Image (tube, rainbow, N blue to C red):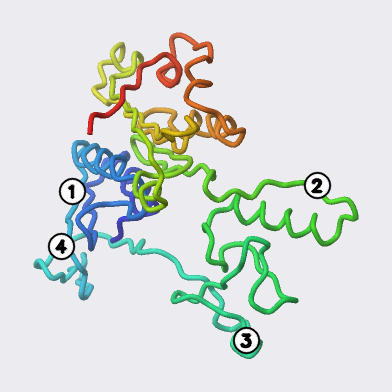
Amino acid sequence: IGGGYIALEFASILKGVGRDVTLMIRKDKILRGFDEDLRTHLQDRMEAKGIRILTETKPEAIQKEASHFIIKTNRGDHKTDLVMAATGRLPNTKDLGLEALGIKQGSKNEILIDDHLQTNVPSIYAVGDVTDRLALTPIAIRQGRTFAENFFNPNPKTIGLNYDLTPIAVFTTPPLSSCGLSEHKATERGLKYKVLETEFRPMKNTLSGKMDRTYMKVLVDRDSDIVLGIHMIGVDAPEIVQSLSIAMTCGATWHDFEATMPLHPSASEEFVTGGLHERKT
């Protein structure tokens, strides 16, 4: 039950060991908040691999029988051997006495902080999954390092804390990864951008007979030529996007990508050999 990355990763694992897997999600598409094209591509790929995805399905009760479970939903009953609830997590902040201190929290009990990790109470700071930022291990570690440098080092080092350029990955089959802005976020910020994309069957799959395809997508600012976002689904996507995030952190333009010497044969060379084509609007 759930359409986030944890639910999808476990669905892929269980399908990989030969189980029949059904995924129940409340919306019409998986991975809310991710790039729309990645969401569509991954949902199609998972269904093609035999994972049954029930959209707009809301579990209302789970009934335990002698040897199985019955999940009652708004769209009928479903019999299953095992139920895994992966509907998300909430910050565990209820017993910290935040209300007594007057610390502001969001609708999910997350602690609200500014760009300096400071709460609305000047002497109190917060880092990690209890805050209103991305709940990822690297973010928590970087926030902790940033706080320690700024408060305990007489000569603090500059440590980057750019949430926009945080690479993320979903380790499904196939995996997907992103760094930078999605189309939705770029549009929301009023940016003028172009979309370059490609889809192909990797060379290693042609030799092995696998039909899995790779999808790549890049958002480029029309005015500055700076790469705003990179999105990929396919073999080695997390490794490739992590490397490209370095270039993005350095402010690379699309011209910089095109001027980069490719490594052949590789899937990643598509990013620098003109393999991506501008989407017609």
Left or right of 136 on screen, residue 193: left
User: Which of disc 3 and disc 4 is earlier in sequence?
Assistant: 4
- Give the residue furthest to the right: 154
Q: Residues within 10 Å of mark 2 (few under 14, many from 20)?
A: few
Tell me how far mark 2 sits from mark 1, CA to CA.
Answer: 50 Å
Residue that badge 4 annotates? 79
Q: What's the residue type where badge 1 is placed?
A: Arg
Q: Could you tell me if the residues under marks 4 and 3 are in contact, i.e. CB atoms within 8 Å?
A: no
Picture coordinates of residue 107, whole percent (x, y): 44, 76
Real-space Cα separation, disc 1 to disc 3, in angstroms: 46 Å
The first of marks 1 and 4 along the sequence is: 1
Q: What is the CA distance from the residue labelled 3 to the residue labelled 2?
A: 32 Å
Residue 163: x, y in percent? 55, 51
Residue 102's disc is 3
The three-letter amino acid code for the residue at tag 2 is Lys
- The answer to whether residue 145 is left or right of residue 39 is right
Q: Which tag is nearer the camera, tag 4 or tag 3?
A: 3
Callout 3: few (<14), some (14-19), or many (20+) C-alpha neighbours within 10 Å?
few
Tags 3 and 2 in contact by the CB under 8 Å rule? no
Name the residue beneath numbered marker 2.
157
Q: Quadrant of residue 95?
A: bottom right
